[in-house]
Image (cartoon, rainbow, N blue to C red):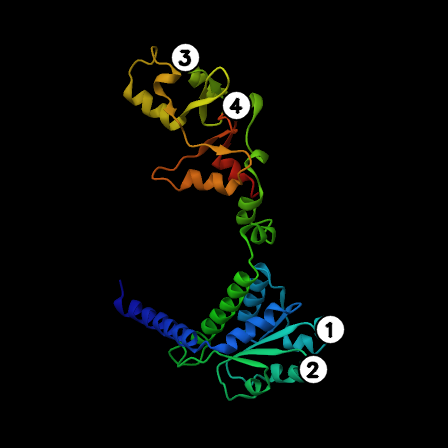
Amino acid sequence: MNNTIIANAQEIISAEIQALERVSNALDSKFEDSISLLAGANKVIVLGIGKSGIIARKIASTMTSVGTPAIFLHPVEALHGDIGIIATSDVALLLTKSGSTEELLRIIPYLKQRGIPIISIVGNLDSPIAQLSTIVLDGTVDKEACPLNLAPTASTIAALAIGDALSMVLMKLKKISTEDFAFRHPLGQLGKNLTIPVKDIMHTGESLPLVLPTDAFRYALIESTSKSLGCVCVVDSDSLLLGIITDGDVRRILQENDDIRDLNAGNVMVSNPITVREDAFIGVALSLMEQRYRQISVLPVVDESNKCIGIIRIHDILRSSL
């Protein structure tokens, strides 16, 4: 390992950490004022050029996804017609390290004509844009992480952090729930985990591999193989769940027993297995499978009386994202 390279990398990351500490310590009542403005906005118009523009896009995307409608507006395109997207009930959020970005300075008069409040995240509090803003948030950094102190690195990280802080505080203020978040991410796996109930993808009816505790272990093997769900559930005559035998259990049983002819399902089942209810979201089922010392890949689904009504596999959850 090249220690010089690692040391250089650590120096760069350290510079960015210091930048984050500085902007965190610089937060004051202006941040609170910004939250008040943003919370009452119809939507947030986020503007920036170059690297600041990329960060602006991310901030707009984050705000929108957590409950505060926002769009990225390119300052140049805005002056060629896109400014029509701005309404009088909006708030503008400008990102600029220098505070003198020409493209942003050109658009400010048009924002003011429409009575749009301007919040700026700047690296120079004495700059023209800072002077023209309604509220100024201090994004000053002592130096860039760039060895030449030129490429936007620490300054963009600092601006992003302030944007994330605005977004997350607004999220808390608006009491955005996990269900609200999932509604905004319907095609992502996270959204599916929080919106799709187990009953929608579980195996039921004739596809369920079920045996009685008195059934021979050999029969349990045949039932498990024929239904191809990676397990067999052991139930009583009323279909109440007593235990489960998974493919992993089968391998263990075969290793421990040279002769399986005298074994029955009740002898070898895992009693009181982990289960899930049909009205639980698939994210709950996934957590039950994965957040264990030994992960499992299949769960019996039971009703309020512990009757086995289905089986859900981790493969079913993963397939739901396709």
Q: Is residue 81 left or right of residue 43?
A: right
Snapshot quadrant of residue 67: bottom right
Distance of label 1 from label 2 (alpha carbons): 11 Å
Earlier sequence position, callout 1 versus callout 2: 1
Snapshot quadrant of residue 35: bottom right
Q: Is residue 136 left or right of residue 219?
A: right
User: Which residue is rendered at x = 66% and y = 72% of the image?
Assistant: 90
Rendered view: 259 above or below 175: above
Q: What amino acid does circle 4 point to?
A: Leu
Rendered view: 41 above or below 288: below
Q: What amino acid does circle 3 point to?
A: Thr
**Circle on res. 218:** none
Residue at disc 1, secondary structure: helix
**Circle on res. 208:** 4
Distance of label 2 from label 4 (alpha carbons): 66 Å
Most foreground residue, 293 or 54: 293
User: Which residue is rendered at x = 51% and y = 89% of the image?
Assistant: 126
**Circle on res. 110:** 2
Residue identifier under label 1 = 84
Residue identifier under label 3 = 214
